[in-house]
Image: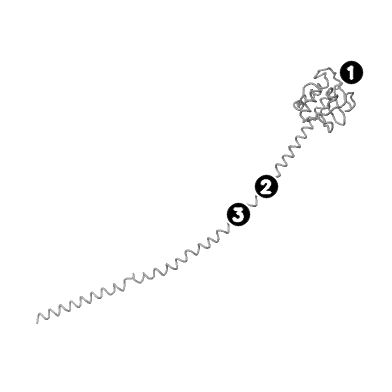
Amino acid sequence: MAFSNSLRALGLALVVALVAIVAQSAPAVAADPSPSAAPASPSPSPSAAPASPSPSPSAAVASPTPTPADASPSPTPSPDVSPASATTPTASTTSAAAARRRLSRARRARVVRIAEAQRGDRYVRGAIGPRAFDCSGLVRYSYRKTHVSRYLGGGHSASAMLRWGRRHHLTGRHHPRIGDIAIYGNGSHAAIYIGHGRVISALNPRQGIRITRLHALGARFTTFIHTRL
């Protein structure tokens, strides 16, 4: 009788233990959130994936917009620069040519002034100044005092000047300029053209240095030497 009671007590204890085990295992299964969280994670990932490419097309479309704006100013300066570069050399060339013409006129006028200042001086054959001259001596003196002797070669004689002028293709019978050299008698006499059909020259011991008409001398006019003053 006592043994059977012990068995019943043991069986009851086993039942209670089994109930306790089942009660502990059931909430553990219900409280585990991992199976329900797994399906939730993929659902936001598709929605997040399309969201990322959406800004990139807008940036791609926006990037070409400044490109024409940046490129448009580049052709604008080129029309402005090319006319300026074409105009500047022309203006500078014109002003340089005008300056050379002014310098040439000033030199020629000074040659004539120096020659005219010697009127009244004596004629002496072979003399080159400053108080006596022959024809080529007066020419050389006037060019030397004007510092343009390099523009007239040929040495101290009218014939040597004529040969030099012909050799350099500077001779001609027409269109003289003030300061050009007039040659007479095929190289026997030299004078300075002073404009308006007149020349100045050292004529001879009796007449000295005088202004005459171009064709008023005893020797026949031959040619001008067009010096490049």
User: Could you say which disc has been placed on residue 82 in the image?
Assistant: 2
Q: What type is the residue that disc 1 sits on?
A: Arg
Query: Comparing marks 3 and 1, which lies closer to the viewer?
Result: 1
Q: CA distance from mark 3 to mark 1?
A: 87 Å
The x and y percentages for residue 10 are: 15, 77
Q: CA distance from mark 2 to mark 3?
A: 19 Å
Q: Decide which of tag 1 and tag 2 comes sooner along the chain.
A: 2
The quarter of the image holding the C terminus is: top right
Q: Decide which of 104, 173 is in the foreground and name it.
A: 173
Vertically, is 151 above or below 126?
below
Residue 210 relative to residue 104: left or right: right
Secondary structure under tag 3 reads: helix
Secondary structure under tag 1 reads: loop
The x and y percentages for residue 49 are: 45, 65
Q: What type is the residue that disc 2 sits on?
A: Ser
Q: What type is the residue that disc 3 sits on?
A: Ala
The quarter of the image holding the N terminus is: bottom left
Q: Decide which of tag 2 and tag 3 comes sooner along the chain.
A: 3
